[in-house]
Image (spheres, rainbow, N blue to C red):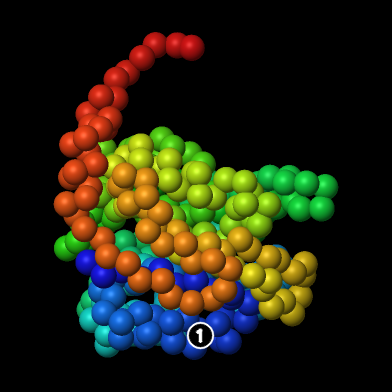
Amino acid sequence: MKTALVQLCSGDDPAANLPVTQGFVADAAAAGAGFVLTPEVTNCVSTSQTRQREVLHHESDDPTLAALRAQADALNIWLLIGSLGLKTDDPDGRFANRSFLIGPDGGIRARYDKIHMFDVQVSEQETYRESAGYRPGARAVLADAPFGPVGLSICYDMRFAHLYQALAQAGARILTAPAAFSPVTGAAHWQSLLRARAIENGCYMLAPAQCGTHATTRGKQRSTHGHSLAVSPWGEVLVDGGTEPGIHIFDMDDKEITKARRKVPSLTHVRPFDGP
């Protein structure tokens, strides 16, 4: 399956971001990709909840979701919208960080709300409190696709190995981790974490990413690591997207999953244990 990772530098204006995203998706399909993936918060990278309340929508009337569903239908492709920031009806007003797997008919085949919130202090200058604006999900999601079952995750989830083991044991052969990764933690941990999750589970690990310094009309400006990554089930880096927006195409081969799992069948060796 020819697959494409879309790397973006989304700002905090969804209306301006959408045509850029659609252009890259169209380019990927024109190059023969049947499965195209976009990054976390494809529609809006923002640190301002005030700005988010102005420009975000509920799922039912989100323009980015509607347009990308129509495009997947028109291009006859599978599309992972890495995630969208969406309004919810939660009493506390927090948003959802939701990933969508879209079928070639434009239908929503799966939804996944990010489980693990990025609440960290990387340095005195760089602090994140994702849970202040986004509510965490509570359900792991495995979706069927003709090229193999897909386990969904988002960004910070990749630090929690048990989530991916559970998805792989449930049948996942492809794992997705769209991201908007911090430059500091990205330089230190990004590739190591993604390669480890691929190797541990004998799965393709696909991580389209946000990159660069993001256009901001309100709130603190944000930068992200880039380096969209595709990793084989044996841990080989197939694609590294560097630091500029664009598309990155590679081939997925299900036989490589079978081959890696035959060599090291660690998923069949998981045992319960007592302690500590």
Residue drawn at the location 29% of the way across and 25% of the way down: 270
Tell me which corner region of the image, top left, top right, bottom left or bottom right, holds residue 109: bottom left
| Residue type at numbered disc 1 | Val
The quarter of the rendered structure image containing the N terminus is: bottom left
- Above/below status of 264 relative to 196: above
For this view, does 259 lie left or right of residue 83? left
Residue 208 position, x and y percent, is: 46, 64
- Above/below status of 31 relative to 153: below
Q: Nearer the viewer, residue 142 or 24?
A: 24
- Above/below status of 134 relative to 33: above
Residue 21 position, x and y percent, is: 47, 81
Q: Label 1, on which residue?
A: 20
Residue drawn at the location 53% of the way across and 62% of the way down: 227
Residue 77 position, x and y percent, is: 26, 77
Q: Nearer the viewer, residue 233 or 51?
A: 233
Tell me which corner region of the image, top left, top right, bottom left or bottom right, holds residue 130: bottom right
For this view, does 144 lie left or right of residue 165? left
Any part of residue 250 in sight: yes
Q: Nearer the viewer, residue 210 or 157?
A: 210
Any part of residue 130 in sight: no
For this view, does 251 lie left or right of residue 27? left
